[in-house]
């Protein structure tokens, strides 16, 4: 009986690990993952390659999805550490085709005074909200530049070599 507390502590540790593992599980429904993949394919980067980043959050009203094309971080040289936003084209008609009906379709542009001083891109994005074919409601934001908290999609060294991150 002197060691009876060990199994209880072990059980408690297992419960803690299980709880933390549950929060890391991808809780997005499969239809949403398919939708994100379809919309990501609409990005047409001006360079040969691009990496689409995304974020999905469930709100009280619907799933909110944000997509953006990842930036490139310069490594070495005078521009070391700078992030270069990717140039791309995005077909809005293809985007509209992904929705059964559209309730809201807006373009947003906000000049950030800090962004203007730091000569970084201002915030511009498209919001479309509507029903998909399976009647799910989605609010989609397609960003012109990645959010600050998103890391780079690529790293480009001073010799021109590009690596994925």
Image (cartoon, rainbow, N blue to C red):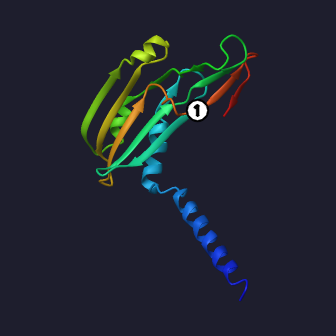
Query: As displayed, is residue 37 above or below residue 112?
Result: below
Task: Check disc 1 and report the residue beneath it.
Answer: 151
- Assign the C terminus to one quadrant of the image: top right
Query: As displayed, is residue 8 above or below residue 85?
Result: below
The answer to whether 100 appears left or right of 51 in the picture is left
Percent across and percent down for residue 6 are: 70, 78
Query: As displayed, is residue 135 above or below residue 129?
Result: below
Q: Tell me which corner region of the image, top left, top right, bottom left or bottom right, holds residue 98.
A: top left
In the displayed orientation, state which residue is furthest to the right. Answer: 159
At 76% from the left edge and 16% from the top edge, which residue is drawn?
A: 159
The answer to whether 16 appears left or right of 103 in the picture is right
In the displayed orientation, state which residue is furthest to the left. Answer: 103
Percent across and percent down for residue 79 are: 65, 13
Judged from the image, the secondary structure of the residue bearing numbered disc 1 is loop
At 45% from the left edge and 36% from the top edge, which residue is drawn?
A: 67
At 50% from the left edge and 27% from the top edge, which residue is drawn?
A: 44
Nearest to the observer: residue 99 or residue 162: 162
At 43% from the left edge and 54% from the top edge, which residue is drawn?
A: 31
The answer to whether 120 appears left or right of 141 in the picture is right
Percent across and percent down for residue 20 are: 56, 60
Nearest to the observer: residue 63 or residue 11: 11
């Amino acid at each position: 009986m002197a060691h009876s507390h060990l199994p209880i502590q072990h059980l408690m540790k297992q419960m803690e690990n299980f709880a933390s593992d549950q929060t890391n599980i991808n809780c997005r429904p499969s239809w949403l993952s398919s939708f994100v993949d379809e919309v990501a394919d609409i990005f047409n980067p001006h360079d040969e390659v691009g990496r689409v980043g995304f974020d999905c959050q469930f709100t009280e009203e619907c799933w909110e999805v944000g997509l953006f094309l990842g930036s490139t971080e310069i490594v070495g040289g005078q521009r070391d550490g700078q992030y270069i936003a990717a140039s791309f084209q995005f077909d809005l008609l293809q985007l509209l085709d992904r929705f059964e009906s559209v309730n809201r379709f807006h373009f947003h542009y906000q000049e950030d005074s800090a962004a203007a001083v730091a000569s970084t891109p201002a915030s511009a994005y498209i919001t479309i909200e509507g029903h998909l074919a399976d009647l799910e409601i989605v609010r989609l934001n397609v960003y012109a530049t990645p959010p600050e908290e998103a890391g780079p999609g690529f790293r480009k060294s001073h010799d021109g070599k590009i690596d994925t991150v």
